[in-house]
């Protein structure tokens, strides 16, 4: 894709490459900004207006989005990683690496934060059973309620930002990797992933803004801060696209790593959390419906 010319002893990018690349990156950034920043910001706005969330609605929305993400990852992204013909083991190891990295980083955050929150003890499920636990806004609220110093609140906010980034970066990578696999064209898989990630970010944004507002932050500032928490989605998309553009090997690694990260997020967090938030069979049916919708989008 990179076109170079040799002129006066130096290599220069051609104008055609510059225009094409800038157009590709602009489209990618705009799409992921809508999914990450606008989706999370919309959730923040709803949280500011309602100052409450519905566990049932959030559960079914998460389960459905998780089902479609699972379908797209398994039937499209992983398949494309294998079809790069760099070797099945490369694709499998990339998936395993994506799972391992996101699990390890989440484990490190949980091990540091969970002992500080009283309701998370040996009787608590080994995974988050509410959105505020998933992004550790409960940790931030705990420090607010204790009227801790500004440094403690800053560190709690930093932890919350890192937890959100750990979800948003791999989500963005799936869009960027899918975009790279389609030669810089926004295909159905990338577009669907962007829409789903935007839907998934709405309840997450509500979980961010509500504790900020209840802690005394003004509603406009809380919505703005919540929207900013979606920026890592753009970073992930650019990273996934950049690795995918290296060549067949890079594309396989990018698709595999992003797929593995999303598989962990879906199976390790989204689906268990959806079931724990709403004790019913409906989240399971919502996830199955999501898988079927994903199949229809890919093969229909």
Image (cartoon, rainbow, N blue to C red):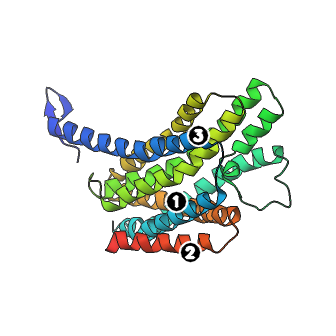
Question: CB of mark 1 within 8 Å of CB of mark 2?
Answer: no
Q: Mark 3: few, some, or many residues within 10 Å (few <14, many ≥20)? A: few
Residue at 61% x, 43% y is 50
Q: Earlier in the sequence, mark 3 or mark 1?
A: 3
Q: Secondary structure at mark 1?
A: helix
Please, what secondary structure does the residue beneath circle 3 have? helix
Question: How far apart are the alpha carbons under marks 3 and 2?
Answer: 30 Å
**Residue at point 65%, 53% (across, down):** 104
Cβ–Cβ below 8 Å for labels 3 and 1? no
CA separation, marks 3 and 1?
Answer: 31 Å
* Residue 55 visible: yes
Q: Which residue is mark 3?
A: 49
Classify residue 292 as left or right of residue 131. left
> Looking at the image, which is closer to me, 50 or 85?
50
Could you tell which of marks 1 and 2 lies nearer the N-terminus? Answer: 1
Q: Nearer the viewer, mark 3 or mark 2?
A: 3
The kind of secondary structure element at disc 2 is helix
Name the residue beneath numbered marker 2: 285
| Distance between mark 1 and mark 2 Cα atoms | 20 Å
The structure residue drawn at horizontal position 59% and vertical position 54%, both measured from the top left corner, is 101
Instruction: Work out whether residue 254 or residue 200 is closer to the camera in this orientation and state it.
Output: 200
Residue 59, image x and y in percent? 61, 61
Residue at the disc numbered 1:
262
Residue drawn 75% across and 61% down?
126
């Amino acid at each position: 894709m990179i076109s170079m010319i040799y002129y006066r002893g130096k290599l220069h990018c051609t104008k055609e490459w510059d225009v094409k690349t800038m157009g590709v990156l602009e489209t990618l950034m705009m799409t992921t900004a809508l999914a990450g920043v606008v989706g999370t910001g919309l959730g923040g706005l709803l949280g500011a207006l309602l100052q409450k969330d519905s566990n049932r609605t959030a559960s079914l929305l998460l389960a459905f989005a998780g089902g479609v993400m699972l379908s797209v990852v398994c039937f499209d992204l992983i398949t494309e990683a294998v079809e790069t013909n760099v070797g099945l083991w490369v694709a499998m190891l990339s998936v395993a690496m994506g799972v391992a990295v996101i699990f390890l980083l989440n484990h490190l955050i949980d091990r540091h934060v969970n002992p500080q929150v009283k309701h998370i003890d040996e009787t608590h499920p080994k995974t988050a059973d509410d959105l505020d636990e998933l992004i550790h806004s409960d940790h931030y609220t705990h420090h607010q309620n204790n009227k801790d110093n500004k440094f403690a609140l800053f560190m709690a906010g930093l932890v919350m930002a890192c937890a959100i980034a750990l979800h948003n970066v791999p989500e963005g990578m799936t869009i960027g990797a899918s975009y790279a696999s389609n030669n810089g064209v926004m295909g159905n898989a990338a577009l669907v992933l962007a829409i789903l990630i935007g839907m998934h970010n709405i309840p997450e944004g509500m979980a961010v803004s509500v504790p900020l507002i209840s802690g005394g932050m003004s509603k406009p500032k809380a919505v703005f801060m919540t929207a900013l928490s979606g920026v890592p989605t753009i970073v992930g998309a650019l990273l996934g696209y950049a690795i995918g553009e290296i060549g067949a090997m890079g594309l396989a690694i990018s698709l595999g790593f992003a797929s593995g990260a999303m598989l962990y997020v879906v199976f390790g967090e989204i689906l268990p959390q959806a079931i724990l938030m709403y004790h019913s069979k409906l989240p399971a049916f919502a996830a199955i419906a999501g898988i079927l919708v994903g199949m229809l989008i890919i093969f229909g």
